[in-house]
Image (cartoon, helix red, strand yellow):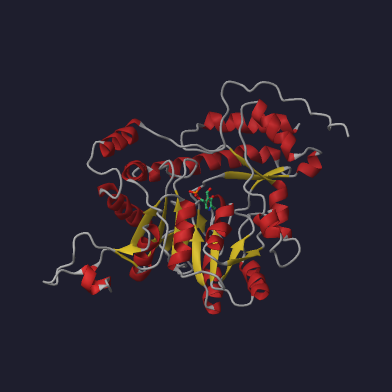
Amino acid sequence: MSAPARRREPPALPNRVLPYGRQVIEEDDIAAVAEAMRGDFLTTGPYVGRFETQLAKTVAANHAVVCANGTAALHMAARALRLGPGSKIIVPAITFLATASAPHIAGADVIFADVDPASGLMRPQDLVDALHRAGKVDAVFNVHLNGQCGEIEEIAAIARAHGAHIVDDACHALGTGYVCDDGHVTSIGANRFCDLSVFSFHPVKAIAMGEGGAVTTNDPAMASRLVLARNHGMTRDPQAFTNIEDAFDADGVANPWYYELIEPEFNWRANDIQCALGLSQLGKLGRFVARRRALAAAYDSKLAALAPLVRPVARTRRCLPAWHLYAVLIDFEALGLSRGQVMRRLQQHGVGSQVHYYPVYRQPYYAQRHDVGPLAGADRYYARTLSLPLFASMTEADVTFVVETLAGCLA
Ligand SMILES: Cc1ncc(COP(=O)(O)O)c(C=O)c1O
């Protein structure tokens, strides 16, 4: 059989391609990391607690537990909720793999919920439908896609009435706010409508740690379990020791070398170098979020000329989004172009783009375990979505360039 004809390679890339997302690192971030590296501890040192205190303050949570990355944070959340074999969780179909896979690796079965085709967010009715299919569910992992949250109060009410815990996958949503039914504004991460919130500090996110993540909670028992889940499931707390003879000296003082295993866990720690960078970046969150909002507003107005073929994702009513991604919905069918063609053309003209996300329930591994047919809302969102460049060091001129390039590529 002859090999299929190879398509022609696209022309050479221009010198500069605007990526869909990237970190903003300034001289004081570099100085903060250098300072940490001159210290006595590169890991389990003072920057870990400092970062946690500052993050908890930033999102108005009682406790923050920092860790290696957002995936580790999701795994720790699953462990803290005691999810394991026999547990069931609900995850919206449009998200990154880790929202499903981290709790699944902990043992939970995943039931995928559909989403709003216009925003990519799980709606209350999507949750009701998924609960109906699932039977008894232990936890709902909700996702604040692109930095936007949906009807989180209604979703919390439904999950709680069912007896399920709620984890917010807020990896996109550090800095996002929500106007509650009672008129108060709460931060995502404050856990007013969930038990745990999970963050990622990957370089494309609102702040960068290289790799980094965290879980916030208001429940001290949950915070203790998160700390165990981060560090081998071992404790140095004498009150928790059960091997009394080995743990304590004859005079009743705990032996200095002794630690005790409660339940085996991984090492999901973040080190002091990461935390020093995170701490420095956290101080800039307000500026970064304001910039992202201004750039998103500039996109909104400049893209109006391309409607209805190109539209920003639908905005939810009560959210004050800290836009992580600037996603648009493009009617590729009406344009007679494939998304791949458009992405390649954009790239050739200096504009990076990405798709967030291929529905996770369609991944072969999960498709084999999926309980119903297609999830129409997720498929429709996926068919049209494209993320355009958005990061805090972009200028309005960059936005104009992206919109004009997109218009040209769609022509
Ligand atoms: C929604 C969502 N959840 C979880 C993760 C995992 O975070 P990390 O890459 O820090 O492991 C990501 C990262 O892209 C994400 O976008």
Figure quadrant of residue 406: top right
22 is higher (above) or lower (below) than 215: above
Task: Please name the residue shown 54% across and 56% down the image.
Answer: 144
Say how many tags the image has.
0
Between residue 55 and residue 6, name the one nearer to us.
Answer: 6
- Residue 123 at x, y percent in the picture: 62, 64
Task: Please name the residue shown 55% across and 67% down the image.
Answer: 140
Q: Is residue 178 visible?
A: no
20 is higher (above) or lower (below) than 116: above
- Residue 343 at x, y percent in the picture: 68, 35
Between residue 23 and residue 288, name the one nearer to us.
Answer: 23
- Residue 97 at x, y percent in the picture: 59, 53
- Residue 217 at x, y percent in the picture: 39, 64
Task: Please name the residue shown 66% across and 75% down the image.
Answer: 132
In the rendered image, the quadrant that contains the C terminus is top right
Between residue 46 and residue 396, name the one nearer to us.
Answer: 46
Q: Is residue 72 visible?
A: yes
243 is higher (above) or lower (below) than 229: below
Q: Residue furthest right?
A: 1
Q: Is residue 302 left or right of residue 48?
A: right
Between residue 231 and residue 388, name the one nearer to us.
Answer: 231
In the rendered image, the quadrant that contains the N terminus is top right
